[in-house]
Image (cartoon, rainbow, N blue to C red):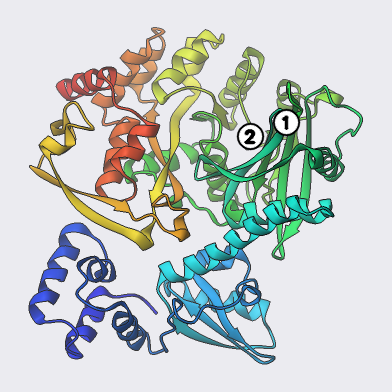
Amino acid sequence: MNTNNIDVLSILKKGSYITPQDAEKIEQSIKDTGVSAIEELTRLELVNKSILGQAISEYYGIPYWDLESKVPDDNLVSMLPERICDKYTAVVVSSNEKELTIALGNFEEYAELVKELKALFPTYTVHFVYSFKEDIRNVVEQKAKLLSNHIQEMFESKRVDIPELVHQIFKEAVALKTSDIHFEPSENDVLIRFRVDGVLQDAARFEKTAYHNVINRIKVLAKIRLDDHFSAQDGAIRTTIENEPVDLRVSIMPTLNDEKIVIRILTNYVQSLTLNGLGLRERDQNLLVEAAKKPFGMILVTGPTGSGKTTTLYSLLKFMKSKGINITTIEDPVEYKIPGINQIQVNNDTNLTFPKGLRAIVRQDPDVILVGEIRDKETVEIALNAALTGHLVLSTFHANDAATAIPRLLDMGAEPFLLASTLNLIISQRLVREIDSASKYSRELSQKDLKQYLPKPEQYFSSKTITVYEGKPSKSNNNTGFRGRTAIFETIYMTPEMQELTLKVPSNIEIRQLANAQGGETFFQDGIDKVIKGVTTIEELLRVAPVDNAITKIYEAGKTKK
């Protein structure tokens, strides 16, 4: 089953729900903006939502289920793992001992969903109904909100069950797609905050009297010393939530008010991620694939902490993995386990550091080596020599942008001739929030309107008006208008001209000018492309990659050379 906008309009015309003139107007809008017919019908309020639901369900050949009037209880919502609810936009709306009824808002991966349901519910007969994506997400989100209320109530209870409380916190965090949980003690109380789509949000606040029990429970689970309250400690927890395995990385740090806890949530979503899903432009993805096919050299991914560097490298490893090559990684920590790849965890207690581990790996007959992070001169030298002697080396590196990576490596002690001859490609990335597709709407901006965001909008937008998109705040997107994140990229491919420039120990400005002259784009330029396509907003792009005079001058210099 596939959604077809024109077929939906045909159904509405056939049933006289809309006039032919309105249908033509919507068809033209679809061609101009790329939004769906459903989004346009809803935005223009041409059809009642219930009638629209009936028409779409008629197209699919299944009944319509109005989730606003027939809301399933929490037990039904809990029957599907959160991963499946989100991936397929699905929720159980009714059940008995032999049958399940599941509301779907997305039929694009229908066959895959049927396979998963057969494995989950082998003895059930499954029936499908149609519901709007936004309504399904609201139901799932409401369940998470109820979890939050339950957590607050548990903290306020005189007989709080600490193990159950900690599990509920983890459960809510996973339901909200939280990347990090923060326990932040102040003088009188403790604030729990969740980082959702890169932004911290308050989740709960409780009195300090229960906090030491919470700390001890987390320390026990993470196998961290209970009697040490004045040292930084790290640990890991593996648990199961909604029948899905979840890995948690725990960091505890003493502060003036008490021990602060930050927990990174490592879910299995990366297992299904591919190169096509990263958000790379076609040119940049082709360059990455070309660099990955070389038998030796180095591919570097740069960016700040939490920008998705490891996810990009893991996606590349999955693309490269085959029976004929030996892939070995050394990481700190190993965030995701990938079958068929040899993964080594750095362990300072046994002196298994990045340099020592990398030296040992080279003697293990590898074809591809992933170094979790280049942190010092010794690791740089070993990695570059490995890349020079017949190995393909992948690694991450902290640099603000792609052009800064080469000067920083040179400052760290890398020899210019060695860097020029081994480096294949540099990718730099940052994460921006994606507009919630279920609540997306468009608006027109003139060049004058754009000047409130950009000093010279004509550099990026040639037409007098531009269509931009935003998301309506709703329960399903935490009242932000965003849901999920994607990356913006800039890449530098080591052409002969770039290699020659590297030998001269260039500045980042010189590197960026040459990269632009060769067709490379900045973060901001890639972000503008995603704004035009309706992936994110101008405001969100400016939050992550602000445009400034330096970027403008570099851009103009590149255009002049072209």
Q: Looking at the image, do the residues carrying marks 2 and 1 touch, with CB atoms under 8 Å apart?
A: yes
Q: Position of residue 83 (x, y in %)?
A: 59, 63
Vertical arrangement, residue 97 with respect to residue 6, above or below:
below
Q: Which residue: 11% across, 37% down?
A: 447
Q: CA distance from mark 2 to mark 1?
A: 8 Å
Q: Which residue: 54% across, 64% down?
A: 142
Q: Secondary structure at mark 2?
A: strand
Q: Position of residue 345 (x, y in %)?
A: 75, 35
Question: Which picture quadrant has residue 179?
Answer: top right
Q: Amino acid at mark 2?
A: Ile
Disc 1 packing (10 Å; few <14; some 14–19; many ≥20): some
* Closer to the camera in the image, 21 or 254: 254
Q: Is residue 547 visible?
A: yes
Q: Is residue 277 left or right of residue 376?
A: left
Q: Which residue: 42% across, 89% down?
A: 63
Looking at the rendered image, the quarter that the N terminus falls into is: bottom left
Looking at the rendered image, the quarter that the C terminus falls into is: top left
Q: Is residue 170 visible?
A: no
Disc 2 packing (10 Å; few <14; some 14–19; many ≥20): many
Read off the residue under disc 1: 361
Q: Position of residue 53 (x, y in %)?
A: 34, 81
* Closer to the camera in the image, 215 or 437: 215
Q: Is residue 437 left or right of residue 395?
A: left
Q: Secondary structure at mark 1?
A: helix
Q: Position of residue 86 (x, y in %)?
A: 52, 64
Read off the residue under disc 2: 369
Question: Which picture quadrant has residue 133?
Answer: bottom left
Q: Amino acid at mark 1?
A: Ile
Q: Is residue 323 left or right of residue 352?
A: left
The circle drawn on residue 101 is: none
